[in-house]
Amino acid sequence: MLAPHADDETLGAGALIAQAEATGHFAGLVYLTDGSGSHPAAERGVQRLICVRRREGAGALSRLTGSRRNRPFHLGWKDAAPAAPGSSKFDRSVMTLASFCVRLRVDAIAVTARHEPHCDHAAAAELAYAVKGRAKRRIVVAEYCVWADRPEPRRYRAIRSDAMSPGLRRYALQAHRSQLTASHGHGFRLPKAMQRMAARDTLFVERGI
């Protein structure tokens, strides 16, 4: 599972994470960015914000999986400043994740959709497809939407996760307190409409794959 920001894992693929863990198929959660861009902060406060976002992500994952043994991995890209394909940072991330996939025998990566409007979301998809090309095994990339509409059905087929336990996704989302409240001052707030989430996830796989 590849999420651009801490909270995207719950919003877009929380049910899938819970299902994968319950069936013994959850390989891990990777966060692309460091979370430093969600709130304006003086330089001395940036590292604290990064630590808070990491702690919130770990908390949400433990709620989704029911276990604290799953700890997210962080690539540490700066918010809203994605590495360009072909750059040294992008290539290092590809190699890191490809190695991860080979070692854990990953056969599918869930990631935000390529047509998502946020640059970090689109970059996460680019990275996932690059990892698919680099890893020496067959990997299916399944895209999930957070802010975007569903992709063109002629190009993608939809797959649905099992339904998660009632209230579990909401409980996991509440771990991301910095994104829901004024606990860290002025900054991003997840709209109320986004906090009403379905019990199942819908993901999209390119047709012919």
Image (spheres, rainbow, N blue to C red):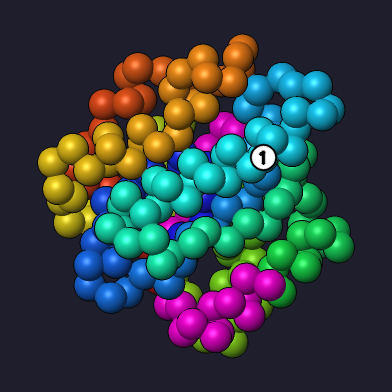
Location of residue 124 with respect to 107 vertically, above or below: above
> Which is more toward the observer, 111 or 78?
78
**Quadrant, the C terminus:** bottom left
Label 1: few (<14), some (14–19) or many (≥20) C-alpha neighbours in 10 Å: some
Is-magenta flag for residue 104?
yes
In the rendered image, which quarter is residue 206 located in? bottom left
Q: Amino acid at mark 1?
A: Ile
In the rendered image, which quarter is residue 45 located in? top right
Percent position of residue 149, x then y:
40, 33
- Residue occupying image coordinates x 60% and y 14%: 185
> Which is more toward the observer, 119 or 154?
119
- Residue occupying image coordinates x 77% and y 60%: 90
Which residues make up the magenta segment?
96-118
- Residue occupying image coordinates x 69% and y 35%: 48
Please indicate whether residue 98 sits to the left or right of residue 56 in the image: right
Q: Which residue is mark 1?
A: 50
Percent position of residue 167, x then y:
18, 38
Is-magenta flag for residue 112?
yes
